[in-house]
Amino acid sequence: MSLDLEFVRKQFPAFNNDETSSWIFMENAGGSYVPESVINKLNHFMIHTKVQPYGLYQPSIDATQAIEKSTCLMAEMINATHSEVVIGHCTTMNLVMLSLALKSWFMPSDEIIVTNQDHESNISPWRRLAESGQKIIEWKMNSNNAELDIAHLESLLSNKTKLVCMTHSSNIVASVNDIKKIADLVHANGALLLVDGVSYAPHHSINVKDLNVDFYVLSLYKTFGPHLGLLYVDKKHHDKLTNQSLEFMPKQYEKITTPGSPNYLRIALNPGGVNHEEAACLSGLTDYYRLLHGHHFTKNKESVFAVVEDVFKLIADHQAKLSKIFIEYINENNAIKLIGKNESDTNLRSPTFAFTLKNKLSCQDVVKALAKRNIAAQAGSFYAWRCLEALGINPYEGLARVSFAHYNTENEVHLLCQSLNEIL
């Protein structure tokens, strides 16, 4: 069975209106298109329930239920319990708040390991803790292949290591790191593991329990939802967190125990609370996955996670075909230097392709030329400053990047390759 691209693209208004349908969108690593089911939920909330939730009148009750339902669905989507997730304003904010909430848990002599392969949002918040006496250790990429070698991590771990922060799949290198193996190693050393799944989550189902991580983050606006970030914190670590919100808030909400309500975790890590309308429309995202599942599979499944897992198997197979086309083109083109491994298997590499040029053209010039052909790509550092420096690339000059999602077609990738040939 293969993914029905015609059916998929019908669910996204961007492919069916005059302003956007002419574009080949290949900047998905920067933010994805949104299906109609999400947009409809957002519109409904803004029209019918745009009031303060947790009131005693019906529109407010409806708003509350919509937000709590979405919160529970986002937890189920990654195989977490409803008490273990925070819907924050973005991943960067979620990580900043988590680092502040964990600050008092660390002792001055504790060590925190960060990588130079990550997006900066999973580096800076932890490096700032050095101001409190924690020692920051850098797990550096292998200079030959840009990979994070597990043997190197093993040499960095010590009895003082308290936390390891890393990426599931870099937004530049794109290799998929072996999180389960790393989790076992980190936990055997008595430390905790935080994983940034922003560049991995658009292409795979996430099972936080199977991965055995302590903390996990992803960006919902890159997984076909609104501009929000999802943070998972294993329930056994909730007591390590100090409240970052208003002092009275945990006490005020402690009697509200409905699933998805503002529990201590969501209050402590999300000052000001969740964005009401954007959180409420997230149920449209799981509606979309159920729609895809019902179209492709004859047997219905009750579990949200089981539905998402089935759908992403189809997505992975389709995206591997897209990656294969582009990898083959790269291998035949001497003008382009690909960052990361020449691999189309999405279990080994996400379909995100950053590259530099061997001729005199700048990456910005190439991306501008693609835009003139109605192909949306991007150039820059992509907030992975340390990664680029480790690769010997000037972050101010940056590199070019194209990134595929499940709604991209093989013909679009062929047109991209053809356009690059004309430009280069």
Image (cartoon, helix red, strand yellow):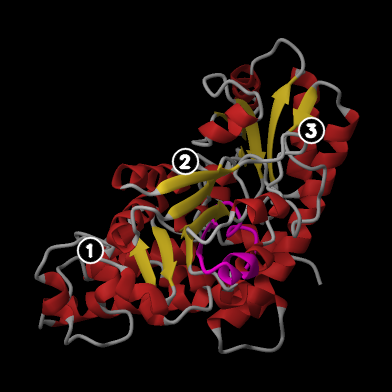
Please state the extent of the stretch shown in magenta in the rendering: 184-205
335 lies above or below 29: above
Decide: few, some or many residues near mark 3? Use Cα within 10 Å; few <14, some 14-19, many ≥20: some
| Residue 383 visible somewhere in the drawing | yes
* Label placed on residue 273: 1
Q: Residue at x 70, y 63 (%)?
A: 315
Q: Which mark is residue 73?
A: none
Up/down of 142 relative to 286, above or below:
above
* Secondary structure of residue under mark 2: helix
**Closer to us: 9 or 334:** 334
The image shows residue 167 at horizontal and vertical percentages of 57, 52
Which mark sits nearer the N-terminus, 2 or 1? 2
Sequence order check, earlier mark of 2 and 3? 2
Q: Amino acid at mark 3?
A: Cys
Looking at the rendered image, the disc whose residue lies closer to the viewer, 3 or 1, is 1
Residue placed under numbered mark 2 in the picture = 120
- Mark 3–mark 1 Cα distance, whole angstroms, equals 45 Å
Frontmost residue, 223 versus 291: 223
